[in-house]
Image (cartoon, helix red, strand yellow):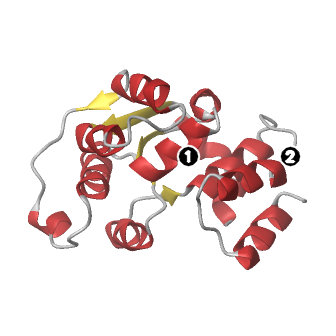
Amino acid sequence: MNWMLNLAWTERHCVINASPLILLGKLGYLRMLEQMIAGVQVPDAVIAEVSVGKGEANLGETLHWAAQRRLADQPIPTEVAAWDLGQGETHVLNHCLLKNRFAILDDAEARAAAKVFGIPVFGTLGVVLQARLQGLIPAARPVVAQLVASGSYLAPELVERALAKVGE
C-alpha cells in the first residue's frame, strides 16, 4: 500500500468500475471522490451494468452522476479481451490503456489484469483510505463498516492492515 504515501495520484484521472461506483454512491461519497482526484470517468458498459439495479437506494443519483462523466465504449483489443472479464471491467481497463488513466476496481481478476498491463489500480477500500489521508473524512473505520454493511466483502485481516496504515 505504498501508493497511499504518494498523493501524486490526486493529479490524475481515473476510470471507475461498477462495484466501487455503486458502493460509493450508496454511501454518498461520489462528491468526495471528485475532491480526491483530477477527474472520474465512467464507461458506457459500466453505466449499463449499474442501471440493471435501478431500484436500489441512491442508484438514480449514482446513474445521473455517472452519465455526466461517461466515456463512449471503444473497440477492445485482443490482449484485453483475452482476460474474459465482465464488460465493465474490460472497458475500464481499455480506457485506462488508451488514455493513461488509473482504474478503480474491486474485482480480483480485473486487478490482476491491470497489474499485467501496468495500470495503477485502487479499490473502494483504497479510496476510503486515501480520503482519510487527505482529511476528507475524520476516520476510515466507520466508512469501512458502512462498506461491509452495504455488501462489500473485505477480509478482516486486510481491513485491519489497511486501517493501521492510516493510524487507526
Crowd band around label 1 with a 10 angstrom C-alpha radius: few (<14), some (14–19), many (20+): many
* Residue 137 is at least partly visible in this image: yes
Q: Which residue is mark 2?
A: 139
Residue for point 40% across, 29% down: 63
Left or right, residue 40 beside residue 6: left
For the residue labelled by badge 1, is the local secondary structure a helix, a strand or a loop?
A: helix
Give the mark nearer the N terminus: 2 vs 1: 1
Q: Position of residue 117 (x, y in %)?
A: 32, 67
Residue in the foreground of this view, choosing between 73 and 115: 73
The amino acid beneath tag 2 is: Ala
Residue 34, relative to residue 137: is it above or below?
above
Residue for point 49% across, 39% down: 12
Residue 25, relative to residue 92: is it above or below?
above
Left or right, residue 103 beside residue 87: right
Q: Position of residue 99 (x, y in %)?
A: 29, 42
User: For residue 55, what is the image quadrant?
Assistant: top left
Q: Position of residue 18 (x, y in %)?
A: 40, 48
Image quarter hosting the N terminus? bottom right
Left or right, residue 89 beside residue 34: left
The amino acid beneath tag 1 is: Leu
Query: Closer to the camera: disc 2 or disc 1?
Result: 1
Left or right, residue 48 beside residue 14: left
Give the Cα separation between the discs numbered 2 and 1: 18 Å
Q: Residue 82 — which label?
A: none
Name the residue furthest front. 55
Q: Which residue is mark 1?
A: 23
Q: Position of residue 167 (x, y in %)?
A: 90, 59
* Residue 17 is at least partly visible in this image: no
For the residue labelled by badge 2, is the local secondary structure a helix, a strand or a loop?
A: loop
